[in-house]
Amino acid sequence: MSKVQDNLRKLTIRRLGVGPKGQGAPAVLTRTVKGEYNPAEGSFPSEVVTSYEGSGLRVNYTSYEYRDTTIKHGDFKLYMCPVLQDGTDSPVPVIADIITFDGVKCKVVNLESWNSSGIECGWKLQMRKG
């Protein structure tokens, strides 16, 4: 990793983090996946729910951006930090993940990854309440 990419990633982590210089707020990413198939029973066991404590920054869409038909009134952007609050790398969010931000559960509707020469620096998520 070159110094430029390393510095960009560090800057993003610092700005989106919850720490003293960060502007981020706690965000809990919850992912639900099916358990592994059990051939003896012929079914899948109950779903496995995993939570990750990260951080992010909420930004509202402008009135101009609402002209896009995929953005509904009440949607917002959430910039997610690439590391969790414990300092480990965050899993890449996927569409339909649930993120609890500011006490409200929201669903990931769309996501854009931003990276610098292949180095993951965070994600811009389109969030929808409910």
Image (cartoon, rainbow, N blue to C red):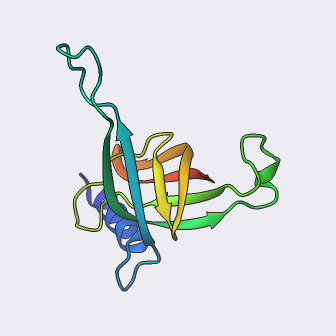
Q: Residue at x 79, y 52 (%)?
A: 66
Q: Position of residue 79 (x, y in %)?
A: 50, 60
The residue that appears at 26% across and 55% down in the rendered structure is 89
In this view, which residue lies farthest toward the left? 40
The reply, left or right, for residue 10 in relation to residue 87 is right
Q: Is 74 left or right of 119, judged from the image as shown?
A: right
Q: Position of residue 125 (x, y in %)?
A: 54, 51
Q: Choose between 30 and 44: the one closer to the eye.
A: 44
Say left or right for 54 vs 98: left
Tell me residue 20's x, y (percent).
36, 86
Direction bottom: furthest residue? 20
Q: Give whichever of 21, 8 is nearer the camera.
A: 21
Total tally of numbered discs in the picture: 0
Q: Residue at x 23, y 51 (%)?
A: 1
On screen, 119 above or below 59? above
Residue 73 image position (x, y, % from top left): 77, 54
- 100 or 64: which is nearer to us? 100
Question: Which residue is rendered at x = 35% and y = 57% of the image?
Answer: 82
